[in-house]
Each structure stands twice: as structure tokens, then as C-alpha cells.
Amino acid sequence: MGRTLLIFRLVLADVRRHPAQAVMLLVSITAATAMLSLGMSLHGATETLYRQTRAATAGPDFVAFSPGSDRTATSALTSLEHAPEVVAHSGPYRQFSTTLTARGATANVVVQGAGATPGPVDRPLVTSGSWVRPGGVVVERGFANALGVHVGDHVTVAGRSLPIVGIAVTAAYTVYPWAEMGAEGPGDNSGLVWLNEPDTRALVSANLSVTSAIYLKLRDPAATQAFLDSHRASVDPNQTTTHFVTWQFMVVQDSVMLKDSQPILVIGSWLLCFLAIAGVATLAAGRAAKQTRRVGLLKAVGATPGFIAAVLLAEYLTLALLADALGLTAARLAEPALINPTASLITAAAGPTGTTIAVTTIIALAVAALTTLGPTVRALRTETVAALADTAHQPQHRAHLTRISAMLPAPLLLGLRLIARRPGRAILHACNMTATLTAIIALLMLNAQPARGYGLGGSSSLTNLKVDQGRHMMLAVTAALIILAVINTITITWTTAQEARPTMAIARTLGATPGQITAGLSVAQLLPTLPGALAGIPMGITLCLIFSAGDVTWPPAWLLFTAALAALPATAALTAVPARIAARKSVAQTLSAEAT
Amino acid sequence: MNEFGGVVRVRGLFKEHGQGQGLVRAVDGVDLEVPAGQMLAVMGPSGCGKSTLLHLLGGLERPSDGQVWLAGQRIDTVNERGLARLRRRSVGFVFQAFHLIEELSAAENVELPVLLAGRSARAARRRAAFLLERFGLADRTRHLPWQLSGGQRQRVAIARAMANEPLVLLADEPTGNLDTAATLDVLRIFADLRAAGQTLVVVTHDERVAATADRLVTMRDGMFVDDTQLAGRTGRLDGLIGLED
């Protein structure tokens, strides 16, 4: 107990001494685990929502559509009611394909005739207002959200203005805008409304396309395919007119809405993990010298290697676990807004699964362990006296780079020599830029793709929610990557400046101006920025091509190059402040501290 | 106005650290003139302000009050950029802890001030080769600092300080980390430099080093308490020979 308490106190003291580093570690890992958790939550999220909606609305296991509403059409459907596998049914109902106009937007709509009391199968859940009544229309929630209409507003259905009396969700149709299920696969984008059955007579006279639908509940909901195989031939011998939809198909179709978002979030989380590792590794390396001295002090007072390792690892591992918890919580809070973009299903986030929690925790711990294990082991292996003298790590001599830099102006000379001190860090910074630019280029590519709106004839008066969702996810991932890249760039500059402080102080005594030192520190970040940013262009394009289906619309090349080259002034601006602060440090104090 | 024709001139120099009850006056009203070609030794107990004085002379720190002239130019009012240029051109520093750049070879360390002065890489290489040969390190040019002995490291540091032919060489305990043989090597170099007309200001604890100077100033509590002209410097240096063992 005493040992654990001592470790805790030492960890707490160190966190208090370096709060900014602790915050940075938290932010990096939180962002990565939140994104990963969200990405993993999307897998199966739609099915969860669909199942919840189905349970709440007594959703059908099986829906059969037959063109027309005459006796031939309905008799084919009603023959299914008596099948031994069927335990309940509703319908047949008539549904009409027409147009609806509201708030200046016109869209295709499926109008379903409904009774004042819904049947035993498919009992839409009214989320606002009331169920259908004469002269009023109930709008499916996803469609209402897209139109921006509420109870009390008026919509024009097939040329007839009707007040909205209610808004409801159902599991008998696939989510907005795929209500047109009468044809093979989802037809053109359509919303769904319910109209009092007598009110639909006006639509019959308007000579609109009409389909009959029946909803069935099976004894074994999983056996929809067997049911279909048994009865398809008797209902539709030619297999040409009647269309069957199972609840399993609806789950698959509904999840198409999130199809673009999942890879964006998962790949985004990989990139974020990489940036988190880069940031934390830089922090750990930057603190290595101090940690080594700390190890020396602990060894000098009799601490065992195991105790010292526990002290060094506990801090990062504890922070990683805390960040993991924060990331999972953030994902849990963001999930409802993400998994149900159309609002056509009941929104009830289930939270991360056990697998998701396990994976994010392992990754968070791995990020912390991978980046701190090396410095910890090195510190433990260092002799006590050497550790106390803080002489454990000396940069390598890079004769070639030193020779090249001698031919350059002072800022470039200093910058290149700073890179030569820690080339690994320059590579890390370049990769940092590549990861960020990959996301930025992918975002530009995604935004360049034409998106067919959900309005009539592909009009953009109604937003394409699927594309919009993908773009929002990409924007969120890119924003998170940019924030981490900004933090990393500042951290790398500051760490480089701290490590090179004695060298820069010596350069000052030899006549280097503070401006040259500042410029040198900036140059040390700018040189790897350029190749890193340029490498992001093909990476971003490749990423988009992998997930794109069909023709790709290319954004202008100048836009991609401008985005990549913008990384240079951005890096210069980010490095200017820490570099300037570092360059202004007292030379005499630095050298005196170095000498003691 | 500075009528003095020497290299260093200081009037009413103060340097304070801290404030309130924690105020420490490291340099307390010092006046000093160092003519060209003179080797001035500054002695005194630890914490008496010797190193601070040296930093003020070289523009590494700014005085709290007073005036500092270097080669007729007042430097206490010059901005950081101007001070950097001044150090580049007119001042060479030698430190007790050597302060060589660890990842650069001996030659590369000496080349650096030449490059910072804007001269070509070729000129820097020539200058470094010349100085390292002059200080007996021709066979150590590619060695990294950790591959050199303390005495060799200090000789590299002196070569680096001399790279741009400064008006004054400011040495802070240059032999503080050296054994007697290495101390003698450094003093020989200083003697050679002085013979060539180089102005030197050497802060030291070592009476043997101070004895080789033209003039000895003693400091206590930030003030000069004694200023003595010394004579027979060659003989004093010769007196040290034989102590290296």
C-alpha cells in the first residue's frame, strides 16, 4: 500500500510540474480513442437502431408489394395472410407515388393510405402531434427533418395543401429517402407520408402510380428467406410483378446511410493514433534527459529498477487510461448525432461495446507504452552517476549534413544542423504533415464529388444526407488531425529548442543573432514540412480512390498544391512563437546551468 | 564620449539580480579600462561577480546601470542583434566547461563562428585548419569533443574563440577543469596570443594563471578591491614548467 501510495505521489508531483504535457497527452489520446470508438460503434449501430424501432412499432418481418390496387393485386397479397408461418398481418394498404412540396422544396413522396387505428403489424410511433385524421397528413420523421417542417405546417401533396397533424417513425420502410420500395431495390429518392385512407381517393382520380402493400409478422422472424422461397411461386408465378422486402434487407439498406462514414472514422482514428504516438513520443524524448536524471536521483536514494519503472510508466499509462475513458465518453455523447443522420429511426445510442472498450483501451495503453518504454529502459540502464550527470544522450555526428549546411546562410545552417541532431524527429514531423495533408486532400476530393440532392430530379433543394454525413465526418476527422498536428508542431519545436538550448546559446556567444536562432528553429520544422505535405497529396488521392465507386471528379490541381503548400506558412507561424521564446533565453544563464 | 584608446572601458557598472529582499548586487560600481594587447586577470572568491563582469563585457548580459565600451563603441545600449554582430566581430569567449558543440568535430566547432560571420565554407575550413595546427591539434581536427582530453577541448575552444580574430578574448576560468599540464598548454597559448598583441581578460581562481598576466584585478562582493600591474610575465610562465607531472 505504501509503495503504491508513493508511486501515486511521485506521479502526481510530476504531472503538477508538467501540466501542459499531461494535457497534451490527454488531448491526443482522447481524440484518437473517441474517433476509433465512434468508427467501431457505427458497425452494427444501424441494426441496433432498426431493431429498437421495429420493437417499438411492431415492425413487419416481411413486406410484399404488388403493383395496382385492384382485386388481382390485393388477392395475390392476401393469399399470404393465411400462410401457416404468418402470425399477424396488416393491410393490404394502398400507396401512391407522387410529389410533395414544402418550404420551396419539391420531392418524390410515397403516400400510404392509413386507417385511424393502425393494424397489428406496423404501428408507426408518433413522435410529435397525432396519428392521421381526415384532412391531415402525417410525415415520416426523417422526411420532415429534411423538409424542415413541423406539426401545424402545410405541405402540398399531389397539388393539394394539407396540414401536418403528426410526425412518426416506422420500421416498415427503409430510412429516408428510400421509401420507394415497390420496385426492385430502392427506387428514386422518396419521402414517406401517411394519409387518411378516404383522403387517398383523390389520388386515385389523379391517376397516380399505385401499389398495394401487406405487412406480415412471421412465427420465426429469422426465417424470412424460407418463407419467401415457399410462397413466391404461388403469389407471383412469373416472378415479375410482386416485390418482397424482408426486415433483414431493410437493415442492410438502412446501414448504407453510414457506409461512407465508417471508413472515414476508422482510417481517421488510425491517423489520429499515429499523430498521438508522434506527439507523445516527442514529449517522452524531450523529457528523456530530465527523466534520466530523475532515475539517477531515485537510484541514488535506493529505489529498485522495478519501482523506478513503475513510477515512469505509471504516469503515462494512467493518463492514457484517463484519456481512453474521456474518448469513450465523448464518443458516447456524439454517437446519437452520428448514427441516425436521417432521424428515421428511434435514436437511442447503445454506447460502446465491450470489444470497442477493449480495443480503444489496448490502443491507448499501447500508445503510452510504445512511446515511453524506450526512454524508460534507457534511463534504467544508465549508470547512476551518468544519469545524475545527465550525460546519457549525445546526438550523433552527421558529417555529411554538417558539410552541406556550411554552404548555406546562417538560418538554414542552424536549421539543418538542428535536423542533423535529431533526424528521427524531422522524419516524425514530416509524417505528421503527411497524415494531416492526407486528410485535407481527402476532404477536398470528397467535396469535389458531385452530390445528387434528394429533391425532385436530384435537385439540391433537399440535401443528400449520405454524402453530407460523409463530408461532415471527414471534416471532423480533418479538424481533429489539424488540431493534433498543431499541438505536435508546437511540441516538436519546443522540444527541439529545449534540447538544443546549450548549442543555440553557444551559437549566440559566437555571434548568431536571436533572429537567426528563431529562424533556424523554424527552418528545422519547415524543411521536413515540405516533403511531408507534398506526400500527403498522393496519399489523400489514393485514399479517396480506394473508397470511391465509379467516376471520380478531380478538384483543380492548384487547389491540392495550395493546400499542401499552405502547410509551410502555417508551420512557420506555429513555430515562430516557441522558437522566439527559446531564442530570447539568457545565454549566460543557459551556459551557467549547463556548466553545473 | 570615450576618449580612451583601449579595447575595453567600463564606467560605473552595476548588475543586480532579483528584487526586494532577494536583491543581489553581482557587480557593484566597477570602473575598468583595458588597453590593447594587455592580459588582465580578474581574481576573487566564488560568487564575487567575476563571471558576471565577463558576461557584461561580452554583451551576454545587460548592466543594471553604467556604461560599457568595446573598441570605442558603447555596447550597453545596443540591441540584441547589434550585440550578436559585435560578438561575431570583436569578442571571443572561452569557458571553464569548454562549451563545445558535442555533435560537431573539432574543426567544425572552429568553423562555426567563421560561417556565422558570413564567410565561405572554404574560408572557414582554412581558418579552422590554421588555428588547430597553431594550437597543436592538427591531428585532432575530425575528433568529436568527447574523443578529446580536457586540455585538447580547451585548445579547440580557444581556437574557436580566435576564429574571427576578435579584439578581445574573454576567458572564464579557462583552466578550472584542467590538470597542470593542460593548464600550462593553455597558458602557453595565451602567452603566444599576447605576444601577437591580443587583448585578453581572464577570470580565474588560479594564482598561477593570474601570475602570468600583465595586470591583476581582485574582486570582492562585486567591487574591485585591488588593481595591480604585474611584471616579468615570461619568467612566471617558465616557473610553471615542470609542474605538469
Image: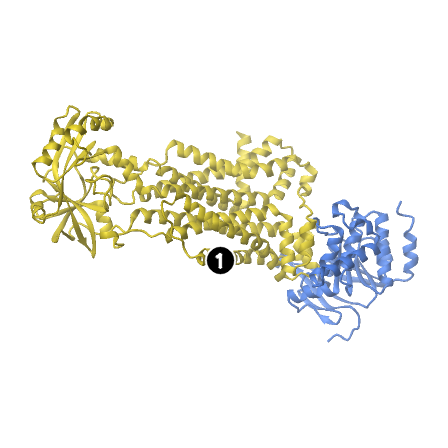
Chain colours: A yellow, B blue
Q: Nearer the viewer, residue A184 or B130?
A: A184
Image height of A63 relative to A257, above or below = above
* Residue bearing mark 1: A566
* Image quadrant in which you'd find residue B69: bottom right
Q: Nearer the viewer, residue A146 or B15?
A: A146
Position of residue B67 in the picture relative to residue A146 (left or right): right
Position of residue B72 in the picture relative to residue A250 (left or right): right
Q: Residues within 10 Å of mark 1 (few under 14, many from 20)?
A: few
Residue type, numbered disc 1: Ala
Q: Position of residue B157 (x, y in %)?
A: 77, 54
Q: Position of residue A571 (x, y in %)?
A: 52, 56
Residue located 16% across and 34% down the image: A215
Q: Secondary structure at mark 1?
A: loop
Residue located 23% across and 26% down the image: A226
Which residue appears farthest toward the front when viewing the image?
Answer: A238
Q: Nearer the viewer, residue A212 or A7?
A: A212
Q: Position of residue A371 (x, y in %)?
A: 55, 39
Q: Position of residue A106 (x, y in %)?
A: 20, 53
* Image quadrant in which you'd find residue A339: top left
In the rendered structure, the residue with mark 1 lies on which chain?
A
Task: Look at the image and tell me whether residue A23 can be seen.
Answer: yes
Residue located 47% across and 36% down the image: A363
Q: Nearer the viewer, residue A116 or A215?
A: A215
Which residue appears farthest toward the top when viewing the image?
Answer: A84
